[in-house]
Image (spheres, rainbow, N blue to C red):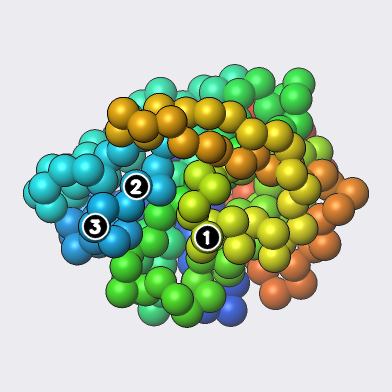
């Protein structure tokens, strides 16, 4: 797409492709949300968007994509990659930043359809996002966070070399819950030799990033 080259950007791993979903693929993305993202009675997200009936979860997943596309500026962006396995969209891997040109810092967040969990995909898609941030955009830091009872997310974070960066006490559906924060510096990041980035150069101004 000439006016929005971010739709031609892709990050590829041995199993996965991360790219913005097309309009036609949003229905399938909504289906993954409707099928379920986590077990009943547990809320891993800071914004509890999954605490809704399946049809509402599906609509929320689709509408969120439209919102972030429309709000995108070089000073404030949320690149919500669809995660594709064998051509099927199975979840979302987000990379976000505010004033990236100044801070050099990104945040990450993700969700994955329940039937695709437990296969190492969460680690692979986060590793791809970090490679994109550090090797593609030239980030200096990547941050993330999870509730202290979200063992799966914390396991991925620690496996990838983040260091603890404090805590916050948040209101999780009316109850105080501890969020653990993590930070990964460029110096601590090991480039992923099996991850490739395609179509990046025309997108760099959209991220507030300078050409390499």
Q: Quadrant of the C terminus?
A: top right
Residue at 29 percent of width and 61 percent of height: 39
Determine the secondary structure under disc 3: loop
Residue at 13 percent of width and 52 percent of height: 54
Q: How crowded is mark 1: few (under 14 residues within 10 Å), some or many (20 or more)?
A: few
Question: Where is 192 relative to 170, above or below?
Answer: below
Which residue carries the number 3 mark?
40
Residue at 70 percent of width and 65 percent of height: 159
| Cα distance between the residues tagged 2 and 1 | 12 Å
* Percent coordinates x, y for residue 2 in the rendering: 46, 40
Question: Where is 154 relative to 109, above or below?
Answer: below
Which residue carries the number 2 mark?
43
The answer to whether 40 appears left or right of 172 in the picture is left
Residue at 73 percent of width and 37 percent of height: 165
Which residue carries the number 1 mark?
151
* Percent coordinates x, y for residue 59 in the rendering: 16, 43
Determine the secondary structure under disc 1: helix
């Amino acid at each position: 797409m000439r006016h929005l080259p971010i739709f031609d950007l892709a990050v590829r791993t041995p199993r996965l492709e991360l790219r913005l979903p097309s309009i036609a693929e949003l229905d399938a993305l909504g289906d993954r949300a409707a099928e379920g993202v986590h077990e009943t009675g547990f809320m891993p997200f800071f914004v509890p968007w999954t605490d809704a009936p399946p049809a509402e979860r599906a609509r929320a997943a689709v509408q969120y994509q439209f919102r972030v596309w429309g709000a995108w500026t070089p000073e404030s962006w949320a690149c919500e990659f669809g995660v594709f396995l064998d051509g099927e969209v199975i979840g979302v891997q987000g990379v976000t930043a505010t004033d990236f040109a100044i801070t050099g810092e990104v945040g990450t967040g993700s969700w994955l359809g329940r039937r695709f969990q437990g296969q190492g995909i969460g680690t692979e898609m986060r590793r791809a996002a970090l490679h994109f941030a550090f090797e593609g955009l030239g980030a200096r830091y990547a941050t993330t966070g999870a509730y202290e009872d979200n063992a799966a997310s914390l396991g991925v974070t620690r496996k990838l070399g983040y260091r603890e960066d404090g805590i916050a006490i948040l209101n999780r559906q009316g109850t105080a819950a501890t969020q653990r924060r993590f930070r990964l510096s460029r110096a601590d990041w090991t480039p992923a030799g099996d991850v490739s980035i395609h179509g990046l150069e025309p997108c760099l101004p959209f991220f507030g990033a300078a050409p390499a």
